[in-house]
Structure formats: structure tokens, C-alpha cells
Amino acid sequence: MSAVATDHAPLALPPAAPATRRNVALVGTTFAIAAGIALVGGLLAAYFGARQDVVDAGGEWVDKATIPNVGMAVAYGTLLLSAFTAQWAVSAIKLDDRRQAYVAVGLTLLLGAAFLNALSFGWSQLGAAAGDGGFADHMYAVTVAHALLVVAGIVLLVVMGFRVIGGQFGPRNSEFVASAAAFWHFTAIAGAAIWWSIWFLEGGPG
Amino acid sequence: MAMTETRPAPAEQAEALPVAVPADPPGIAGWLSTSDHKRVGRLYVATSLLFLLVATVVGAVVAIEGTQSGLDVFNDATSFTQAVRLYPEALVLLAALPLLIGLATTVVPLQVGSPEIAFPRGSATAYWLYLVSGAVLIGSYLADGGPTGASREAADLWALALIGVLLAHTIALVSLLTTVLAMRTSGMTLLRAPAFTFSTLVGGSLLLLTLPVLAARLVTMYVSHHFGADFTGYDGISWAWSIPSIYLLAVIPAGVALEVVPVLARNRVRAHAATLTVLGLLGVVGVGAWAQRPETFDDLLYVAIGLAAVLPALALLGLLGDTLRAGKPKVASPLAFAVGTVLLLLLGAVAGALLSIEPLELHGTTWESGVFHLIVGAALLGGIGGTFWWASKLHGAALPEGAGFLAFLAVLGGSVLRAAGDLINGISNDLPLNAREFDTDGGTEALNALAAAGNVLLAVGALVAVLGVLAALRKRGTGVADDPWGGHTLEWATTSPPAAGNFDDPLVAVTSPTPLLADEVNA
């Protein structure tokens, strides 16, 4: 049945398109985000598990008076705000507005650095060092791991920023920008979850 | 229907060639700098087999200690406990899982018709991180570390090395999963994806959600320990190789079996969609990061999942049995590996189901170890069987069939003997896990000797597999058929070993889960 097609070359269908790379960066970033969610979820689960053990044993998990509510609210609020500027960068690239893209990426980096600064200030205000007990150990494990994720996001943004300056992205080629922004959104949302779980629940509204 | 399978004219092929993938430089520099997924996969396979040899030797020594109550092979309890901890960590995280990742790194891009893996440098980075972290992990134990070690620095190193191994596997899985989802060739929908590729998607996705949870636990343990506390709660680690999580290790080997059996039976699996469903169910029952604490063993969900795990294993056996029965099976070592994989998986699932029934009080006994060895045995059979099956693509040479059967017998026999000793001791003697001194009534020592013999056989199997790979290296380039088995999927449509870029000619659109079989039938 295939003889007709095979013997007469003009009737042969054209070859299939070569293997396409369908949003590879975005798909990869999505999987990385999934792993990141599992990591942060696992850290928070370990935190709450240890907390429950202490509470069940009649102990005090943390002295609530020492929680730096305002400082931490500002820190994580800054990070959340930076998610909007990251999305602004995506939008600017899609509109082919390079100048806005520079400003948006720059602002996102600035806010990311501000978050790390505010977080370290909050740690200093807490007055508890790692090794001071269950709360301190778990809190530092969660917040430092998250801070490292933010640093990874900053590295991605810096790479993206240089490539924006190099003119590599445009309205039809914005996938890498969208991927970096997606990862940044993840760090912001994970930060919000951490703020709620550790700082807000323990310290109450600042 | 035949129109779409007609080969295009040469002039058109030249225009549609896939993206150019540069070849590696020759020699050692090529191996050190490679990002070719086939080479990275080979490195993974070879390294994981070496780690398997180390792990099985450690396991054999640990098991020999149990052959006589009070026997003191290790001189002190701390060294014994360290070896007990190292054994499953090395067997699962340094041997079985990387073996499967290595196979998938080589084969999945070929199966989906892609010229390369999604993140070539990511996969290469993952391999080197795995190699270094794995070596550091073993080194930390040798330096009196591990969770029970006396050296605090070496113990810290243990936690960091394990985190490094987990990070490496996570990066490798991201690259693999992205390849499956984003780089399939034209016409290959997920429902037309080969079973091995689909099993990588299912098993890999769920491992991607599980390994970071284990890493999170290690991070908290590291922080506490580094700043003065002692390691506590090894349960927070060992859940990863207990039921239900351990079932995740069997998903990709099940995919190997589903590739091998139809080809060697010269038949199709009757319902490809059913195959994919079974693989999905096998993955679902392996989601187990929630079952870390002993309190969860009473949960209805834990019992339900424990019992339900038998169903996909049974369905798998049914599917493959039906395929074999309706076909004309050709006896070859990969077929033995495939059947052994499924049988061990089924036995492990049944033993796991009994473990999940709390009134039987099997937790904490050697029954757990029996379940572990059955499932890990299934994974090893699948992984080693895969290296024999895809040897022409991995190594550019066929592996000796004799070595294949020998490795199969050693790994199957080793797993069964080890599991039998543990299971019987667990249920009839209530023998606690990893006991150095125990009541010798009920033939405990004889059963432990049986288990130890199993471990020795496992080590022999690992050694044979390593020697098989070495034999393949010597035979490389001596000529091997592109499709020595008459395969059904796209990896057999290219040369052995595949060139840089994988496929010399552009592929025609895929219209079925067995594109090469469709071509053959139509021709």
C-alpha cells in the first residue's frame, strides 16, 4: 500500500519538522520551581514538626517578644514587591521597550539586595544564633536556604540583564526573561509563606 | 496511512537536519569537558556500578556480622552502625538511582527523537557533582563521620555530601524531565511516548518532589549539628528507602521491562494506554515523603497505599505476561532481567503490604530490610538489564550474553536470599533491624547466614556488571548492529553508537507508540 508513495518521489510528504525545542527554559524552570517548592515545604514541615514536639513536651518554642516583626515584614514585603518589577521586565521585553526593561531588571535586583540586607538586619535583631535551640536552628535552616534561592534568582537576573543589554531578547524571544521572572516569583511566594509560617505566626502582627 | 511513513527525498533531508551538536575533543579532555548526553550517561552508568560494588561489599560485611550473635567483625558498635547507615545510602543514592538516571540520560533523548538533552551542561554538572559528593560521602564515613561518627567535622561533611548528591540528582532529573516534555519529535504525543520515557517522566517527577524534602531534612540536621547539637531522628532520613517512597525506585525499571518484553516477545503490548496508566499508578503509590514519622504507620492512608501498591505490580505482571504469552519470546538476558524485575517488584509490594498492616508489628524488624532488598533488587535488575539492553547505544558494543545471565542470576538470587532471610527472621523471630546480639532460637543465625549469602551474591552480581562494562569498552568499535534486537522505538533508528546530534537523517512524524514496528509492518 505504500508502494505508490515510495515509487513516486513527488508524492512523498515532506519530512517532519526537526525536533522542536518547545519552551525548554520555561519548562526546565517550572521543574526547578517544583523542586524548590518541595525543598521549602520540607523545611517548613521539619520546622513545624520540631515545634510540635517541643509544644507537646510542654516547652516554649520561642520567646515571642524577641521576634522582629516589623523588620521581617519589611524584608519579605520588599521581596514580594520585587515580583511585580520582575514581571514588569517581562512585559517590557514583550513590548520591545528596552529602556523599561533595563529599569525593571535593575529595580528587581535592587529590591532583591534590599531583601537580603533587611533579612540580615532581622537576624541581628532576633538575638539568637544558630545552635541556641530548636527554633533558632530551624529558623536559620529555612531562612538561609531561602536566601540562597534568592541569590540564585539574582544570578539569573544578572545574566538576563546582560543579555538584555546585549540585545538578545525581543518580543518573539522572551522565554528566558519569563523563566527568570518565574523563578523570581517563586522566591517571592516562598518568602511570603516563610514569613507567615515563622515570623507572623510566632510574633503576631507587628 | 503509509504516506506519512515514506522516507523523504535526500535533498529535503539536508534542509531539515536537526541543530548541529559539536563533537567532543578526543581523549581525556573530551571526557572531562563533555556535555554529550550519551557520554554523560555512560559516565553515570560506570560510576554507579562501581558505587554498587562498594555498597554491596559493605552490605555483605554488615550481613556477615549477623551470622553469629556477638560476632565482632567491626571491632566496635560505632563502626558497625556507620556501615549500617552507609549501606542503604550508597545502595540507593549512589548506585541504583544514578544507574537509572544514567540510562535515562543516554536513552531518553534518543527515544524522543531529540538531537540532545534539554540542558547538556546541566546534566554534565549533575554527574560531576554526584561523583564528587559520592566520593566525599564515603570518605566522610572513613573519616569517622556519618550520623553516628565521633568526628564532628566528618559528620558535617556527611550531611553536606548527601545534600550534594541530592542536588546532583535533582539537576539531572530537571534536565531529563524537560527533555521528555519539551523536546519530543514531531507527532510524539505523551500517549505515544515509549514506556521507558514515560516511566522516566513519572518516576522522575515524583523523585523531583521527594529528594528535595530529604535534602530539607538534611539541611536542618546539618545546621543543628554544625552549631553544637547531636544528630537525632535518623527516621527523618531513612523514610526515603522505606515504603512507600522506595517504590519510586521501581518505576523506571518497570519502564525498562516494558521496553524489553514486547520486543523480545515479538509482539506489541495490547494496550499502550494501560501500560502508561500502570506506570502512573506505580508512581502514585510511591509518593511517601509524608510518611516520615512512626506515628503515620497507623494512618489509614499508609495502610491503604501499602495494600494498593500490589495492584500496579500485579497489573504490570499481567500486561507483560499477556504480551509474552501471545508472542514468540526470544530468550536473551534482558528478558530475564525484565521478568525478574517485575517478579521482585510484585514480591516487594506484597511484603510491603504486610508491613503496612500495623497489627502484624513488623516495623522495626528485619522484615523492613526484606522489603527494601526486594524493591532495590527490582531496581538493580531493571538498571543492569537496561545496560545490557541498550549496550549498543551506550557503549557501541554488545555486552556478553553469558555475563548478562550471570549478573541476572547473581542479583536475583542475592536479592531473594537476602530478602528471604530477613522476612522469615522478621515475622517468625521478631528480629530487630541491625541487631548485633540477639536470641539465637528459631534458626536466627542460619537465616542471617542465608541473608549474608544473598549479600555476597549481590556483590558478585555488581562485579559481573562492572566486568561486563569493561568488556564492552574493549569491544567498542568492533562493529555492532544499529538495531540488534529488532526494537520498536526511535533509539534503534540511529547508529550504534549514535553520532553527535543523534540522528543522521531527519525523522518522519511519529504516528504510534512503536514507530519502527509500524514502519516494518507497513513495509
Image (cartoon, coloured by chain):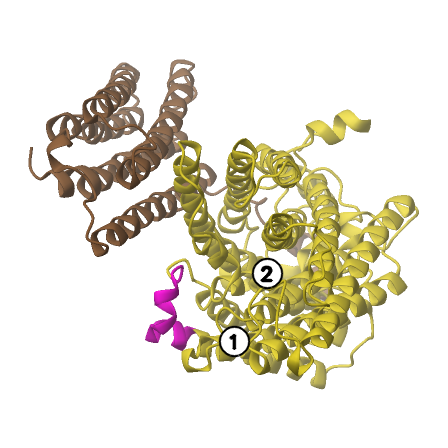
Chain colours: A brown, B yellow
Q: Which residues are magenta?
A: B291-305
Which residue is pictured at 49% across the width and 50% down the height?
A: B181
Chain ID, mark 2:
B
Measured along the vertical axis of the image, is residue A97 above or below residue B175?
A: above
- The percent coordinates of residue B105 (x first, y second) are 63, 47
Count every numbered label the image shows and give the total.
Answer: 2
* Residue assigned mark 1: B312
Measured along the vertical axis of the image, is residue B336 above or below residue B71?
A: below
Measured along the vertical axis of the image, is residue A40 above or below residue B22?
A: below
The answer to if B422 sits in the magenta stretch is no
Q: Foreground residue, B442 or A111?
A: B442
Label 1 Cα neighbours within 10 Å, binned few <14 / some 14-19 / many ≥20: many
Q: Kindly tell me whether residue B508 is visible in this rendering.
A: no
Q: Which circle marks residue B481 in the picture?
A: none
Give the CA distance from mark 1 to mark 2.
14 Å
Q: Foreground residue, B493 or A154?
A: A154
Label 2 Cα neighbours within 10 Å, binned few <14 / some 14-19 / many ≥20: many
Location of residue B308 (image quadrant): bottom left
* Residue assigned mark 2: B252
Specify which label sits upstream in the sequence, 1 or 2. Answer: 2
Q: Foreground residue, B232 or B317?
A: B232
